[in-house]
Amino acid sequence: MSATPPVTASPSASRWRWVAACQSRWHSLTPLGRDIIVILIAKAIVLTVIWFAFFREPAAPQMAMEPNSVELRLLAPSPAPEAPNAIH
């Protein structure tokens, strides 16, 4: 007896099945659900563009800070602010 390898679907066939399943799920959603998904995708795209445009790297080389100094500044306990009308 010769052993025959199991029949597996090609990657493109499984991909098409996945696309068909997504399309059937998409059509089964309510209009509100579809609107929410579209808005969330658009929001993710806009936030990514904003991040790439403004926050990916410092605007000027001199704006770079050492992580240790930032950590000390952010994690150091701050003194309690004194009220302007406090009695001494």
Image (spheres, helix red, strand yellow):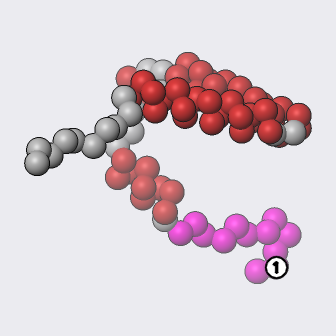
Per the image, label 1 sits on a secondary structure element best described as: loop
Residue 52 at what x, y percent from top left? 52, 22
Asked if residue 32 shows in the view, the reply is yes
Asked if residue 55 shows in the view, the reply is no
Total number of numbered discs in the rendering: 1
Residue 77 at what x, y percent from top left? 53, 69
Q: Is residue 87 magenta?
A: yes
**Along the line of sight, the residue nearer the viewer: 84 or 56:** 56
Please give the name of the residue rendered at 34% of the width and 43% of the height, measured from the top-left corner: 66
**Along the line of sight, the residue nearer the viewer: 30 or 36:** 30
Q: Identify which amino acid the numbered label 1 is placed on.
A: Ile
Please give the name of the residue rendered at 88% of the width and 34% of the height, measured from the top-left corner: 31
The residue lying furthest to the bottom in this view is 88
Quadrant of the rendered structure where residue 42 is?
Answer: top right
Q: Left or right: where does residue 59 sit relative to residue 27?
A: left
Return the residue at label 1: 87
Residue 19 at what x, y percent from top left? 58, 29
Please give the name of the residue rendered at 85% of the width and 69% of the height, measured from the top-left corner: 85
Q: Left or right: where does residue 80 sit relative to residue 87?
A: left
**Along the line of sight, the residue nearer the viewer: 7 or 15:** 7
Q: Is residue 23 magenta?
A: no
Quadrant of the rendered structure where residue 13 is?
Answer: top left
**Above or below, comparing residue 61 to residue 22 in the picture:** above
Q: Which residues are magenta?
A: 77-88
**Above or below, comparing residue 81 to residue 45 in the picture:** below
Please give the name of the residue rendered at 87% of the width and 39% of the height, measured from the top-left corner: 30
- Quadrant containing the C terminus is bottom right
Magenta residues: mostly which secondary structure?
A: loop
Quadrant of the rendered structure where residue 78 is?
Answer: bottom right
Crowdedness near tag 1: few (<14), some (14–19) or many (≥20) residues, C-alpha within 10 Å: few
Q: Left or right: where does residue 76 sit relative to residue 64?
A: right
